[in-house]
Image (cartoon, helix red, strand yellow):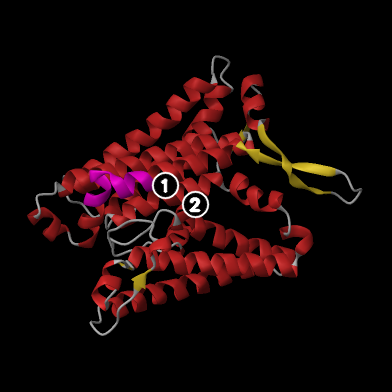
Amino acid sequence: MGANGMQKKREALTNSNLLFIIAAVIFVCMYAFAMVRYPGSFLQFQTFFDLFSLNAPLIIITLGISIVMIGGGIDISVGAVTGLVTMCCAVFLESGGGNIFGAVLLALGIGIAFGLLQGFLISYLEIQPFIITLAGMFLANGLLTTIHKDPINVTLAEFVALRDYEVVVPWLGTYNRLGKFIPLEIKLGTVIVVLLVLLLVALMKWSRFGRNLYAVGGNSQSALMLGINVRKTKFYSYLLSGVLSGIAGFVYIMTTGAGNVGNASGFEMKAIAGSIIGGTMLSGGVGNLFGSPIGALTLLTINELIRAAGVNSNYQAIVSGLLLYVFIVLQSIVVWLRGSKDIRLALPPWLRFGAKAG
């Protein structure tokens, strides 16, 4: 087979896939180092799944903000909306007439309301997304402190049962110091994260909305000339981000069992950082949603490494900031290299996955 035939059997490595692969390799190397350096903490399946379980809301928010960023936008209200949803659900469940189904509807309703409002103002009135979502963040924080100022522990029996429910994997676990085998326990938050990742990856790869969003994020004027409804596409991205914030809020209270004014504080910055580290570019048009949980887990692994080393917690923010600098510069370098006609990067058939756009 000639050179042309071989070339046809190879797929060009997109920016989205390349940045995702880099992020995945860095995460795997970092976690492997953690397992070797601190085997007592990291050399257990339970530790890895606990990263998902305890940080499921952050990962869900990261997915939502990645979708918005792929479309060339930004949403800094996601953390505040998540906190508002958490407190509202806690108040509702402790009101005496609350139930889990009603709390789920309330969470989705709040998320949809913010998504509709912000999506309309940004997409159809063409107001800068940073300004609108900043206003949304202030609004959600204000509502949060108005609804209830003190922490609320949810004691509703059916909710406590849901909070404590675990999926047990009997054949996968670890032995404790007494030699007793403890099976792997997976919280429902982890299951929700996995389902959302698979669903959203499929949406972005195979749906018209996903293809349109990559096109809009890459160049909105070109997308408009191709007949894509740019306003509607952007609107749906913010609506989806709002829905995911609502889901994250309910998962948060399901994880902690309480509503608190400080819930989800700073989540928006962590989500943006995790999205960038996972390979999503702020300029839009490039991103792989498989990279969103990878980016969030990379930040969380850094924090756990620093905590295991007994180092001052201030170094967590320092290392996270430096890592963010590295990935932003790396993204710029990758895009510059990809724009060079003298450089050709190809992806082997067995690595073909992720979004085709970008």
Q: Which segment did they paint magenta?
A: 201-212
Place residue 37 in its image quadrant: bottom right
Q: Is residue 238 above or below residue 291?
A: above
Residue designated by label 2? 267
Question: Counting other residues with Cα less than 10 Å from the Cα at mark 1, is it few (<14), some (14-19), or many (20 or more)?
Answer: many
Task: Tell whether label 2 touches label 1 (CB within 8 Å).
Answer: yes
- The answer, for residue 158, to whether it is visible in the render is yes
Residue designated by label 1? 78
Quarter containing the C terminus: bottom left
Residue most extreme to the top: 97
Q: Is residue 171 above or below residue 278?
A: above
How far from the left and from the top, in percent, is residue 159?
Answer: 61, 25
Three-letter amino acid code at the position of disc 1: Val
Residue located at (45% from left, 47% from top) = 61
* Distance from Cα at disc 1 to Cα at disc 2: 7 Å
Number of numbered discs on residues: 2
